[in-house]
Image (cartoon, helix red, strand yellow):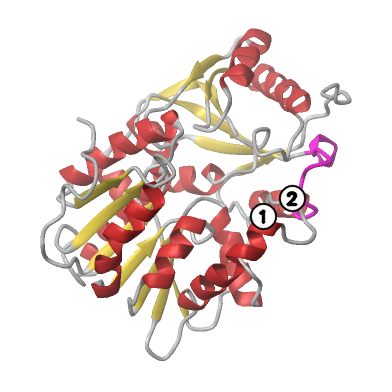
């Protein structure tokens, strides 16, 4: 069943909590947060929580969000599906429709504080409680930037002076950052499975141990082989495509991997080439990998490059015999478009993965991509 458009699924009353999500992983982590609050007996997770999906255009992401929306409804949550990017007038319609709720809701949960859409909505909000749930490894960067008093910039963005759009949006971003900073009348919580080396003063950090996922799914059937987890580092311009494909082939051969779980943002052309050159079976998951792995079947070894799953999969698979192994990104794989911070950030993702086995980086031939 597809989510209904617009403001269907909501009632005339103001929700105690309004959650904004733009990806399947964000929606999963809102469900984990609601489950954790229920366990702490602060409120029943199914009462007063409205999930607002700011739907992207990408069909793979939309498909996973539809499946996650069904799970959210099964948990008793209300859901509001907004085609927030469906044309030039969509943002005005979405923001205008949400403004009354934003001004009345006392608690707001966001999955991506770097999102310009979310930042714009935060400028309207009057909530006294703000919660940031994981949007993958970006949460680590957000917390660090907030602690250091820096402007909010995604880690893979090219360094240098801000562009024209950044300058135009700067006042909105600055206001959103202030909203995400604790104050006398404002509480801020970060709900995360990621390690935090810096914590902003006054911010409450709550651990996400994927209790909801483990309670609802599995334990999985574990197979003898290995599975490989894909990444969108090529698509974001961080890693060279030829070197990445070569590294995947070397890892698959060395560990006997048969399946490749594609990231939802990986391009079709790259995946076709990867299948042809490595012989791997390409799997397009219809849910976040934490749920796919927990449902099974899953390989005894899960291979990954530095990404969120090296932190989340060991938690989701607690009590199973699955081993998560992470392969470092060799600096030679980085493109000239990669941010100066890229290597340090990716290395930090690997070194802080407490329950993942670390593999040496793969040596690859020189890039041939123009």
In the image, taking residue 357 as reference, residue 35 lies left or right, namely: left
Quarter the N terminus occupies: top left
User: Disc 1, disc 2: CB below 8 Å?
Assistant: yes
**Secondary structure of the residue carrying numbered label 2:** helix
Q: Depth check: 298 or 274 in front?
A: 274
One can see residue 282 in this view: yes
Q: Position of residue 84 (x, y in %)?
A: 38, 47
Q: Which residue occupies 66% across, 76% down?
A: 148
Per the image, the residue denoted by label 1 is 155
Indicate which disc residue 97 carries.
none
Q: What is the spatial separation of the Cα atoms under label 1 and label 2, in whole angstroms? A: 7 Å
Q: Position of residue 351 (x, y in %)?
A: 68, 53
Q: Which residues are magenta?
A: 330-341
Q: Which residue occupies 69% across, 51% down?
A: 157
Residue at the extreme right: 366
In the image, taking residue 82 as reference, residue 200 lies left or right, namely: right
Quarter the C terminus occupies: top right
Per the image, the residue denoted by label 2 is 342
Above or below 244: residue 164:
below
Residue at the extreme front: 89
Please say whether residue 339 is one of the residues in the magenta stretch.
yes
Above or below 281: residue 132:
below
One can see residue 33 in this view: no
Task: Name which quarter of the figure residue 295 lies in.
Answer: top left
């Amino acid at each position: 069943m597809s989510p209904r458009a617009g403001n269907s699924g909501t009632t005339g009353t103001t929700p105690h909590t309004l959650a904004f999500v733009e990806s399947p992983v964000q929606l999963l982590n809102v469900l984990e947060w609601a489950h954790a609050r229920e366990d702490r007996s602060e409120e029943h997770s199914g009462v007063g929580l409205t999930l607002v999906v700011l739907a992207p255009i990408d069909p793979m992401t939309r498909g996973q969000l539809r499946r996650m929306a069904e799970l959210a409804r099964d948990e008793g949550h209300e859901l509001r599906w907004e085609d927030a990017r469906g044309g030039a007038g969509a943002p005005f319609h979405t923001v205008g429709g949400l403004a009354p709720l934003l001004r009345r809701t006392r608690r707001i949960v966001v999955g991506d504080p770097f999102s310009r859409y979310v930042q714009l909505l935060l400028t309207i909000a009057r909530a006294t409680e703000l919660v940031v749930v994981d949007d993958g490894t970006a949460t680590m960067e957000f917390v660090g930037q907030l602690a250091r008093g820096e402007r909010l910039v995604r880690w893979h963005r090219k360094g240098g002076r801000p562009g024209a759009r950044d300058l135009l949006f700067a006042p909105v971003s600055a206001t959103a950052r202030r909203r995400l900073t604790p104050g006398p009348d404002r509480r801020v919580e970060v709900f995360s499975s990621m390690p935090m080396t810096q914590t902003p003063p006054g911010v409450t950090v709550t651990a996400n141990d994927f209790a909801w996922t483990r309670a609802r799914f599995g334990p999985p059937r574990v197979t003898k082989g290995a599975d490989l987890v894909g990444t969108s580092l090529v698509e974001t311009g961080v890693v060279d495509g030829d070197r990445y494909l070569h590294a995947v082939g070397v890892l698959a051969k060395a560990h006997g991997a048969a399946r490749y779980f594609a990231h939802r943002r990986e391009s079709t052309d790259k995946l076709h080439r990867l299948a042809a050159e490595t012989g791997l079976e390409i799997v397009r998951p219809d849910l976040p990998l934490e749920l796919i792995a927990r449902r099974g079947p899953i390989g005894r070894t899960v291979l990954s490059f530095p990404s969120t799953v090296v932190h989340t999969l060991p938690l989701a698979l607690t009590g199973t015999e699955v081993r998560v192994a992470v392969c470092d990104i060799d600096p030679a794989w980085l493109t000239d478009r990669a941010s100066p911070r890229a290597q340090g950030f990716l290395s930090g993702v690997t070194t802080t993965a407490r329950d993942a086995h670390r593999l040496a980086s793969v040596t690859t031939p020189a890039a041939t991509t123009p």
